[in-house]
């Protein structure tokens, strides 16, 4: 099978490319110049570098490579999508049709353009299903009663936030919402939360959108997430089971266990 992978930042695209190669699939990387790392080039069968906004170039390269199925892997910072982007004529036309400037409407419009060109946008996690968070405890320690109260409260807020396409994460302390994620990302949000409740334990809740598909904006955690949790005094993390990627899971769990953190997968709210 041949896939195209639009590669953003982080380990997600590299793992997807490596998995494709291991199972005998041909994976062509379309690496976003402003986001992707050089590791993408080494993992791909072939790699083409494109800038944010070069929709026409992406389509032309897909036709040249014979790619008819493409997936998005890795983060593209929301702030860059709507502030740093220099659209070509095709993307500029798409942007003019948007009723609101959010990721949901933008990717939906791009998906339609790709489909018109015979290119199907497929599930971002298609190659990485074993890395999706399980239901239940991921770490040795489970959330204690106080952490679970914060998590249950935070899940309602996080899912409302995700449904509005504003962010995926919230920080909770003593059943109070300390911070909401917006364009700054989870790590920056946690650091901001820690500065507001110095000395208190934080619980982090990361939610997936209520949309049924996993075409984009799939929640991801990895060892770096654990590092920031330790730095900010965040002792518990809840994610949506089956809808959140655990990257470099062995290292993630080892670090979390060493720090006595609690990480758990929970059934996504409907």
Image (cartoon, helix red, strand yellow):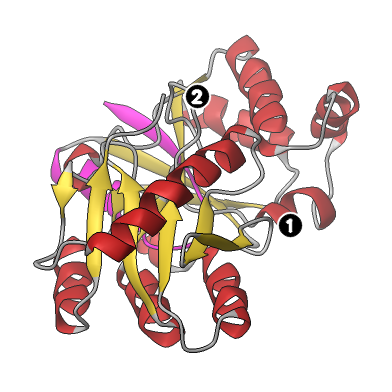
Q: Is residue 150 left or right of residue 23?
A: right
Task: Name the residue that disc number 1 marks.
Answer: 80
Towards the viewer: 156 or 88:
156
* Among the two numbered marks 1 and 2 on one chain, the one whose residue lies closer to the N terminus: 1
Towards the viewer: 9 or 210:
210
Q: Nearer the viewer, mark 1 or mark 2?
A: 2
- The residue at the point 60 percent across, 49 percent down is 167
x and y percent of residue 225 in the render?
38, 70
Secondary structure at numbered mark 2: loop
x and y percent of residue 15 in the render?
29, 54
- The residue at the point 51 percent across, 63 percent down is 171
Q: Is the residue under label 2 in contact with that under label 1 (CB below 8 Å)? A: no
Relative to 65, residue 254 above or below: below
Q: Is residue 247 left or right of residue 212?
A: left
Are there few (<14), some (14-19), or many (20+) residues within 10 Å of tag 1?
Answer: some
Q: CA distance from mark 1 to mark 2?
A: 23 Å
Q: Is residue 248 visible?
A: no
x and y percent of residue 58 in the render?
63, 36
Relative to 43, residue 165 above or below: above
- The residue at the point 80 percent across, 32 percent down is 91
- The residue at the point 64 percent across, 57 percent down is 77
Q: Is residue 243 left or right of residue 10?
A: left
**The N terminus sits in image quarter:** top left
**The C terminus sits in image quarter:** top left
Q: Which residues are magenta?
A: 1-23
Task: Name the residue that disc number 2 marks.
Answer: 211
């Amino acid at each position: 099978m041949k896939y195209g992978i639009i590669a953003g930042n982080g380990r997600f695209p590299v793992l997807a490319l490596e998995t494709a190669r291991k199972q005998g699939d041909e994976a062509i990387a379309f690496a976003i110049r402003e986001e992707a790392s050089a590791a993408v080039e080494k993992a791909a069968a072939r790699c083409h570098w494109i800038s944010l906004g070069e929709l026409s170039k992406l389509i032309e390269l897909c036709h040249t490579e014979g790619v008819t199925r493409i997936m998005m892997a890795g983060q593209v910072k929301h702030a860059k999508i709507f502030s740093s982007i220099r659209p070509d004529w095709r993307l500029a036309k798409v942007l003019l049709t948007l009723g609101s400037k959010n990721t949901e409407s933008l990717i939906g419009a791009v998906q339609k353009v790709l489909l018109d060109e015979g290119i199907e946008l497929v599930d971002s996690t298609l190659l990485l299903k074993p890395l999706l968070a399980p239901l239940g405890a991921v770490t040795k320690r489970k959330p204690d009663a106080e952490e679970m109260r914060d998590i249950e409260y935070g899940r309602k807020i996080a899912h409302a936030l995700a449904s509005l396409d504003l962010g995926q994460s919230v920080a909770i302390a003593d059943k109070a919402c300390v911070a909401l994620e917006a364009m700054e990302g989870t790590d920056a949000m946690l650091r901001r939360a820690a500065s507001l409740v110095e000395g208190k334990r934080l619980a982090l809740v990361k939610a997936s959108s209520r949309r049924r598909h996993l075409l984009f904006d799939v929640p991801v955690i990895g060892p770096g997430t654990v590092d920031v949790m330790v730095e900010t005094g965040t002792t518990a993390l809840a994610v949506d089971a089956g809808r959140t990627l655990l990257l470099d899971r062995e290292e993630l769990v080892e670090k979390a266990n060493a720090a006595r953190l609690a990480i758990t997968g929970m059934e996504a709210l409907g």
